[in-house]
Amino acid sequence: MIIILKDNPEEKQLDNLISWLKSMNLDIHFSKGESTTILGLIGDTSAVDIDLINALDIVEAVKRVQEPYKNVNRKFHPKDTVIDVGGVKIGGGSFQVIAGPCSVESRDQICQVAESVKKSGAHLLRGGAFKPRTSPYAFQGMRAEGISLLLEAKKQTGLPIVTEVMDLSQLPLFEDVDVIQVGARNMQNFELLKELGHVDKPILLKRGLSSTLKELLMSAEYIMAGGNERVILCERGIRTFETATRNTLDLASIPLLKTKTHLPIVVDPSHATGIAHLVKPMAIAAAAAGADGLMIEVHNDPAHALCDGAQSLTPEQFDDVMNAVNAVLPYAYKG
Ligand code: PEP
Ligand code: MN
């Protein structure tokens, strides 16, 4: 349920209303915009008397919110959420690019890639230290050492870092990480999401391989319900009957999610296609469709990458993609 207040509500009356709602075990999400203030009620609102609230002097309107996600709902928070990552603003009209290798492989590799993507205009550095691999025999990531190397690359370039957590037990290693990624395979690891709700860091939540948008939003709701409001959604393609690409990029999810949530949405055309030459057209398309940013895999030597080489761009190819994306940004769909 949302309560839309009249302009400049009388403070005493507002305090009384809030205390009364809290006495019914409801959490209140307060959203103050330029023209309207909205109270979002979270919890069991079945006993709340809508007519009684509507009759209050300070109340403009009361509406029931049908969707099961509340905190992530744009009805609760009409303005775009802007997430500040070490001075880089994600959401609310800016466009940010996260780039780097699928996996951290060595000091030279991550530092070289970090320098080159920075030169091309990337704003954040990615790199997996803990890798969710289909085969137990495939490279599993450098783990703790991978995180240390990412921190070195951050020190060298100043780029904030994004890396994936796979399990709760790894969280202590993420103290100096700027953005914690939850991978597609963990999108519905609810215990992990609950814990990340108590972490004071932005979370990049990737859409599950076969998850609906509603399920993605419900997973974001888990994090926000714990008190962490800094969630970035990531469309990374979904599994369909098509096998020519690794996944199918759901471009329509971008403008659709924008109507349903205030959270920023970035697109990962690398995992969405699995094929390096498809990254550029899909990056352009995602930018044009109104995404808040991109996440792109870049490797200094894709042919010898320990993970996802086929979809990784060389630094030169990445530079070309950045130029193409920058050229379409002025024409991007804004809703
Ligand atoms: C990744 O970003 O490295 C990754 C494993 O992606 P996803 O979880 O989307 O498969
Ligand atoms: Mn990858």
Image: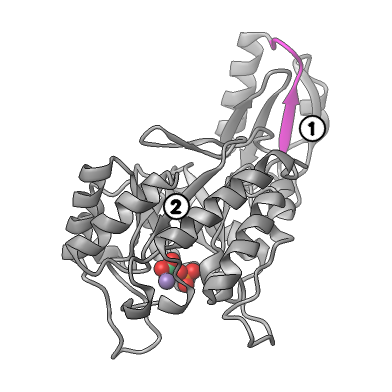
Circle 1: residue type:
Val
Q: Quadrant of the C terminus?
A: top right
Circle 2: residue type:
Ile
Q: x and y percent of residue 16 in the render?
A: 61, 18
Look at the picture and state if 44 lies above or below 173: above
Does residue 120 appear anywhere in the picture?
A: yes
Query: What's the residue at 28%, 40% (across, down)?
Result: 158
Mark sitting on residue 62: 1
The secondary structure type at the circle numbered 2 is strand
Viewer-side residue, 287 vs 281: 281
Look at the picture and state if 32 lies above or below 102: above
Look at the picture and state if 36 lies above or below 158: above
Q: CA distance from mark 1 to mark 2?
A: 40 Å
Viewer-side residue, 240 vs 149: 149
Does residue 222 appear anywhere in the picture?
A: no
**Counting other residues with Cα less than 10 Å from the Cα at mark 2, is it few (<14), some (14-19), or many (20 or more)?**
many
Magenta extent: 1-9
Look at the picture and state if 199 lies above or below 234: above
Viewer-side residue, 63 vs 20: 63
Query: What's the residue at 60%, 71% (across, down)?
Result: 278
- When asked about the image quadrant of residue 112, the answer is bottom left
In the figure, is residue 29 to the left or right of 37? left
> Which badge, 1 or 2, comes first in the chain's sequence?
1
Asked whether 226 falls inside the magenta stretch, the response is no
Mark sitting on residue 98: 2
Mark sitting on residue 50: none
In the figure, is residue 283 to the left or right of 193? right
